[in-house]
Image (spheres, rainbow, N blue to C red):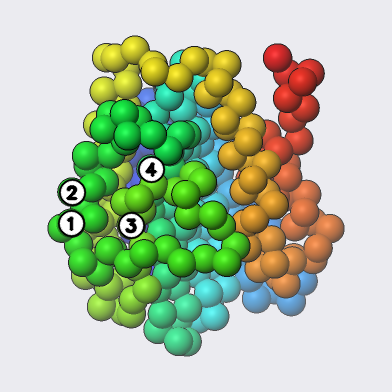
Amino acid sequence: MFDDLLNELTKNILEHGGKKLVVPNEFCERLSKKGNCKLNSWLWDVPEFRRWRVTRLDAGDRLQVLNSVAYPNEKNDMPIMGIDLLWFGKKQKLIAILDFQPLVQEKEYFDRYFDGLKSLKKSFNEFNSDIKSNIYDPTKYFSPWALFCKGSNFELENILPKVFSSFLKYYWVNLDFAKDNENHITSKKVSLLHIDYDRYSSEKDPAHGLFSGFFGKEWSEKYMKEFLFPLSLEDINSSF
């Protein structure tokens, strides 16, 4: 499950000049204590991006996950790309969130980068649900047009692949736009916002509980801090 989407994402990255980076052995592949879950992680060096990571969790019929986050470099103020796909096979339940995660919640910024996402939100009713969360603040690093679906096998097989392809296409369009136009946010501010994003996400991301259940609390905390959100360890005052 999600292997075709992972292959499509990988193909997109390679077509845009991406090269695989070495991931520490403790993170690149991890088996659960019971042997019923495997976690694979990849890092990519992609032109115009500071960091691009991909995570694939395979727990059989219990759970399948594909997650990816792409951080543009500090000279580029475009949104962070976020993909989080979960399939609960036994329950035949899909949860999917795809978003251009905005650095700021401002109309001018939205006008620059969100036309593509807006059109997807209108085109696919299945991904037009509102995000209601008691964990995240939906107005902080989520856009008003985040694609959110709670679906079944139908959405998994028939709708998600179309949304996924279009989502990636529009994100690359944003990259072309950003390269041809000046930033509205300074490079220093972009770097600070990326640090804040990682700090916020490392505290709020519910994946910590999921990973702890499979791989233990100690390793999961290390994975969250050092691989998923490494900027959460940065000291802002000493970095600038």
**Camera-nearest residue between 176 and 79:** 79
Disc 4 marks a residue whose amino acid type is: Phe
Give the SS element for disc 1: helix
Q: How far from the left and from the top, in percent, is residue 53?
A: 53, 41
The residue at the point 78 percent across, 49 percent down is 222
Which callout, 2 or 3, points at the residue further toward the start of the chain? 2
Disc 3 marks a residue whose amino acid type is: Leu
- The tag on residue 100 is 4
Residue denoted by label 2: 119
Return the residue found at the far right.
218
- The tag on residue 147 is 3
Instruction: State left or right for residue 34 relative to residue 71.
Output: right
Tag 2 and tag 3, C-beta contact below 8 Å: no
Q: Quadrant of the N terminus?
A: bottom left
Disc 2 marks a residue whose amino acid type is: Ser
Tag 2 and tag 1, C-beta contact below 8 Å: yes
- The tag on residue 122 is 1
Question: 10 Å neighbourhood of mark 4: few (<14), some, or many (≥20)?
Answer: many
**Is residue 7 something that shows in the picture?**
no
In the figure, residue 225 lies in which quadrant?
top right
Q: How far from the left and from the top, in percent, is residue 143?
A: 39, 47
